[in-house]
Image: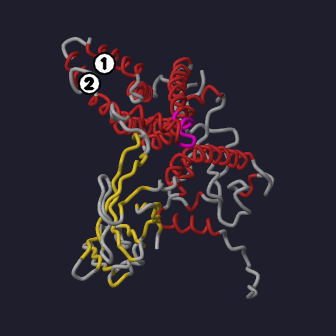
Amino acid sequence: MATTPPAARPRPRRAARLGDAIDERLDVRRPLARFLSKPVPEGITFYHCFGGLAFFTFVVLGVTGVVLAAFYVPSPDHARASLAWLGSSVPLGGVLRNLHRWSAYAMVVLVVAHMVRVFVQGAYRKPRELNWVVGVLMLVIVLAFGFTGYLLPWDQKAYWATSVGINMAGSVPVVGPFLADLLRGGPTVGALTLLRFYAAHVFVLPALLAVGLVLHFAMVRRQGVSEPL
Amino acid sequence: MNSGNETRDTPDARPPNSLAPARRSAPQPGITPVWPPAAGEAGAAAGPDGAGGEGGRGVTRGRFLKLSFAAAAGAVAAALGALTLPPLIAPALRSRSSGWVALGRAGAPTPGRAALPPKGAVARATFTRDVADAYLPRAPRTTTVFVADLGDGRYEVFDARCTHLGCPLVWDQAAREFHCHCHGAVFDELGEVVSGPAPRALDRYATSMKAGVLYVGGLEEA
């Protein structure tokens, strides 16, 4: 309609203008540019991708886990029924659940592959010892994820696997019996065990792993990727 | 060999780029900011330094990688969304369960059948039907309604919830009105709004009279 005089300079795109406005107030582009334009040493191969792929499975597990949490009931009465209903009556419900399951398997495999790569290439050596330590702690967290998640379907396999696992904890000298009762929430595997494992699986362990990931990534950014030997 | 060498000089280390003077902290040697592009440049496709010899507006390696990463991330996000949204949305699309259920018999009550209100009267009534609730087995659920005898064997069955925000209604026999005690809505004996915040008349159930027994069906919004 209205004819606009030709501008001397093209008006920046709307998104760019929004970015300018935010940057003017918060000064985010400079640190972001530093963060995003980190050089990597030569000789980076696909073996260096295991860690990132493990993180990718964590993202998939987080997304599918949140949706599963909207269907799963952590109660001995309803755990089985709620999952059966998810698989039979919810579109893509079975796919969702199995995506979570297979991502969990893949995460353990990728975490171990990442660890092997770091070990074989000696990338754990000074100055990166601390990151190795954080990584090993996160390996324990990932295995704890697997152990707690295994009980949630509340079937025979889950019940007996958890019984065996808790009995292993119970064989620790001195504190073992107390530790086992603490994990079970009593003398037998039951409703409290399921709730404890559920709470650990969806609240405690994700928070711990998130902290570990932040530390892990921050140290990688600070120290750079180690050069292959 | 194996040191934290973020400040390693790369062979293609560039001269201080045009952004550098504007910054308090100079970029680290060996790190060439690729984003944001300097003001006044042709676009993100060009290198940050005008003299970079990147070939102007063509697709640079950095831009190609950036777009590839964005495409891959977008594909992953789309796949996750396509897998996770249907399960969340599907339960919202379920149709209300209905089906005809007997509410009462006109005239005198018979065993197992409640009596309907006498002519011109309004009475509270309940009916029960099995309702499926997700993973729970189908279980009886009782619904409260108000039945109004309109004469000529015609009955109106009102939902007992206010059309404002769903609070239960009370029948005031003296005033011949329905009152909602939550926010003061008032409906007359035909379900029409008398006063208060209710946006529409009372919702009714489909009704059917067979052999002197009144059946109710699905709920119909007024």
Magenta span contains residue A92: yes
Q: Determine the chain carrying the residue at label 1.
A: A
| Residue matched to label 2 | A184
Relative horizontal placement of residue B213, taking residue B95 as reference (left or right)? left
What is the span of residues highlighted in magenta in the rendered image?
Answer: A90-97
Q: Earlier in the sequence, mark 1 or mark 2?
A: 1
Do we see residue A71 in this rendering? yes
Q: Secondary structure at mark 2?
A: helix
Q: Position of residue A199 (x, y in %)?
A: 33, 36
Amino acid tagged 1: Ile
Amino acid tagged 2: Arg
Judging depth in this view, the residue of A190 and A116 nearest the camera is A190
Q: Secondary structure at mark 1?
A: helix
| Residue matched to label 1 | A166
Residue at 59%, 57% in the rendered image:
B20
Q: CA distance from mark 1 to mark 2?
A: 8 Å
Residue at 64%, 30% in the rendered image:
A44
Say few, some or many: other residues with alpha carbon within 10 Å of mark 1 (under 14 / 14 to 19 / 20 or more): many
